[in-house]
Amino acid sequence: TFSTMTMMNAVARSVVRCPSLCRLHRHSKGRHFAVQAQQQVSYSENEFPDRREAPIISRTKAADVVVEGRPKNNSNGQHRIIPSTRSIGTERPAHIPPNVPIESLEIPETKITTLSNGVRVGSMETYSQVSTVGVLLDFGSRHELEQYTVPSTNKTVSTAGVNHLMELLAFNSTKNYDGPEIRNILESLGGATFAQSGREQMMYCVDVLRPNVNSAFNLLGETIQSPTVQEMEVEEMKQVIMFQTMDMMPQVLMGEGLQLAAYGPMDGKLQQLGRPHFCTAEALPNLTADSVHAFREQHLLHNPERIVVSGSGIAHDALVELAEANFGHVTANKSDSSKITIPSIYTGGEYRLQTQPSPHSAKEEFTHIAVAFEVGGWHSLDLVPTCVLQTLLGGGSSFSAGGPGKGMYSRLYREILNRHRWAESAEAFTSFHAESGLWGISGSCPPQFGREMATTIVQQFDKLAEEFVTDEELDRARNMLKCNVLTQLESRLVLFEDIGRQILTYGKREDAATMCAKIDAVTKEDIRDVVRKAIRKPPTVSSVGVDISTVPDLGQITQMLGRNSNKRSWI
């Protein structure tokens, strides 16, 4: 066929033009190339391969190659031997633990110690050559304020968006080092740094070679305790925030809008869980270095009980010593005993955002829709059943690399993605907080199918409320959730984070066996009870896209949800 011939001609041309492949054909075509080269005009080598001249074939022996700065091989044919700088000796380096029988090692377990000032230390020894250590702090974007008066200076500043800024400012200039110095030191120690802010907690982390963990942790402590927060660095990071806001993914905007609508304003004031997590364009001009200092003074400098030092791949006693040296001096402020976390009340609502078209004309635009309901928070008995329900629904994108085994048999794949050609993605999600949580289904599709996507999502809620899930679905979901938990905990970074967050949230850490037992105890009755309790409350709807005119509004989705049940209190 024509296409096959075209492809073969293209391959032939590539063979002729490629010097390395031409060596394979030098015997049969070398003479032809030589004649052709004499007949054609010579060209500059910089014009190759745009010109069609014959390639020049040359042969070079390895012994004839001369490397700059290295003498040519001796005439006697002896090769120069490069001495090894890391020869293996008979003595073990001091920084490498000795090999011992496995019977003499302690079984890894989580150990927790509370320092005299209230700072908690949790760790698990994994006997690895790399350690992950860090600090988790019990504050987040929910604790930001539009106006806050600093007690020490009586100055009023805005802390809205400061957590986003602090995440970007992490591991910058401190009292003893500037930003480039800190990065160079950590690089020389073989370490990598991470900082992450959330609505309720903030995390600083260093992943470093075990012999250098002491130096890395001391540097981490200085980063948290005494950053200089220079105005120049603040302005630079504000530029980064501005660029991030301009380039934010529509899925992120949809999730952020869902949170704002779910916990809407009460009495004209924003609720803590209804505050924006990312710094908004309106809040950005009000952020200064004073905003960072004020927020740190309110939540960090005098609150040792809200600090957790966590580690994986490190001896517990060693981590306790490091925590004592770096955070043992933090004292509590007895005069400030007010409760800073104010519980938020779920309201339900709607968020609609029409975005600008992409400047890339080849990029296909999709409409993104999410419908969610309130479920229990971190301390709810419905936490594990909700996680099993999310895994059972599963979902993802219409294109998923890896094939079966990545959730292809979950309900949303089978009943939405494999059934409707217009469905670009469909996925169940959860979002948990201290006092409340969200569970729902999101999807994306071409703009003209917005109503169909919303209707399909609503049908999934109705089916879950009216029918039991099958035994096969439930078994698969429980096994998949256990597999995900155990696989994630194989990572020292995930293990470090899990230890710290559980101690901050619960004051203890449950082991994997206890968690797996809770997952196995979930029944299909539990799943249906969670769904029925959730849909008795008003829904939250979020839609983002270039064209959201076809997406039903909150009232229309409420009517869809109310057609098949007369037990919903919000109708």
Image (tube, rainbow, N blue to C red):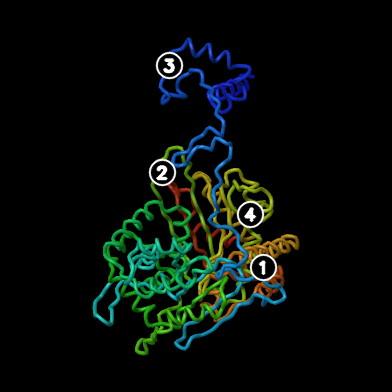
The image shows a total of numbered marks equal to: 4
Label 3 close to label 2 by CB (< 8 Å): no
- Residue 428 in the image: state x and y as whole percent: 58, 59
- Residue 40 in the image: state x and y as whole percent: 46, 12
- Residue 174 in the image: state x and y as whole percent: 33, 70
Neighbour class for label 2 at 10 Å: few (<14), some, many (≥20)?
A: few
Residue beneath label 1, please?
Answer: 528
First in sequence: mark 2 vs mark 4? 2
For the point 52% across and 64% down, which residue is it? 539
Residue beneath label 3, please?
Answer: 42
Taking the image as shown, residue 342 lies to the left or right of residue 36, namely: left
At label 3, the amino acid type is Ser
Alpha carbons under labels 1 and 4: distance apart? 17 Å
Residue beneath label 4, please?
Answer: 412
At label 4, the amino acid type is Leu
First in sequence: mark 3 vs mark 1? 3
Residue beneath label 2, please?
Answer: 358
Residue 279: which quarter of the image? bottom left
Alpha carbons under labels 3 and 4: distance apart? 64 Å
Alpha carbons under labels 2 and 4: distance apart? 28 Å
At label 1, the amino acid type is Arg
For the point 58% across and 40% down, which residue is it? 78
Specify the quadrant that holds the N terminus. Answer: top right
As displayed, is residue 400 above or below residue 322?
above
In the structure shown, which secondary structural element does the residue marked by tag 4 occupy? helix
Alpha carbons under labels 3 and 1: distance apart? 80 Å
